[in-house]
Image (spheres, rainbow, N blue to C red):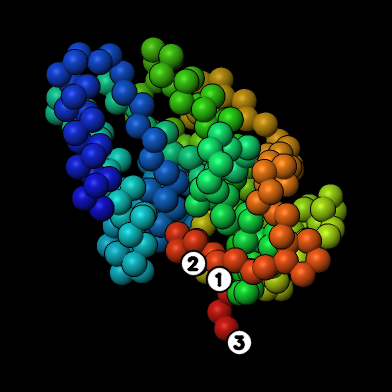
Amino acid sequence: MEPAVKGTLNILEVCSSMKVQKVVVVSSTSAVHFNPNWPQGKPKDESCWSDKKVCMENELWYCVAKTVAEETALEYAEKNGLNVVTVCPCIVFGPQLQPVVNTSSELLVYVIKGGPNAMNDRLWHIVDVRDVADALLLVYEKPESSGRYISALNYINTKAILELLKKTYPNYNYVKCKDNADQNSPITPISSEKLKNQGWKPRALEETLLDSVEYYRKTGILQDVEGEGQACRLPDLFQFFHAAEE
């Protein structure tokens, strides 16, 4: 947690000393989702913050770090007169610039390769990396932008993702999915209305997923998984997607 918080503060202090006019901090919906006191049935918005105690009790250290770092950034902005805006993307898919698979993409690769553990039929909030880039530029350039912005328009459950992918790419192994929907998931609908009201226009979910798979295919990430492929490991960040052993 210290690198996330101290690193953010170091950058903000430099921005203050250099008289930077606006700073956009990339946070995460991990700083939004984990709030058991949020009214049931109400989509979470920018006023919803993850409960740090709940995250620590469940050893969700990434969520703790993201929550504390974002809170620290906004507190620093208020105390020091720095114009800070935060953007909270959800699970980010889409074509990558770098050759190494990032953590979010590892989740989708796990689904396609058919990792060893079944997954819960949980809600996924997905955003395209190209749309995140658009969101960052948008809030930077808009003089009236302020506070937090959730970047998470599309959502889909695990079974629906599998159905969509299998329809276009039937020859992969694919992970097994538990039949019953996970009623206890902390991941519930969230709203990006504030960002949409600034003019954000993200692409359709299917385009994001299929463009992601095409990128994996062209770069050889999936070349060993047709037919008898090799299983892979679900990143620690997404361990809550694992279905309980029966």
Residue under pointer 2: 239
Q: Residue at x 36, y 55 (%)?
A: 62
Q: Position of residue 173 (x, y in %)?
A: 76, 66
Between label 2 and label 3, give the one nearer the viewer: 2
Residue with the mark numbered 3: 246
Amino acid type, residue under disc 2 in the picture: Gln
Marks 1/3: CA distance?
A: 12 Å
The C terminus - image quarter: bottom right
The residue lying at 62 percent from left, 39 percent from top is: 94
Q: Using the image, determine if residue 63 lies above or below residue 212.
A: below
Q: Is residue 78 visible?
A: no
Comparing 209 with 124, the one in front is: 209
Tell me if label 2 and label 3 are in contact, CB under 8 Å: no
For label 1, the crowd category at 10 Å Cα-Cα, with few meaning under 14, some 14 to 19 and many 20 or more, is: some
Residue 167: mark in rendering = none
Q: CA distance from mark 2 to mark 1?
A: 6 Å
Label 1 sits on residue:
242
Where is residue 242? Give x, y as percent: 55, 71
Tell me which numbered mark, 2 or 3, is placed earlier along the sequence.
2
Left or right: 29, with 124 as reference point? left
Q: Are marks 2 and 1 in contact (CB under 8 Å)?
A: yes
- Give the residue type that dot 1 points to: His
Identify which residue is drawn at 84% across, 58% down.
Answer: 170
134 displayed left or right of 52: right
**Place of residue 157 in the rendered image (x, y in percent of width and height, measured from the top left):** 66, 57
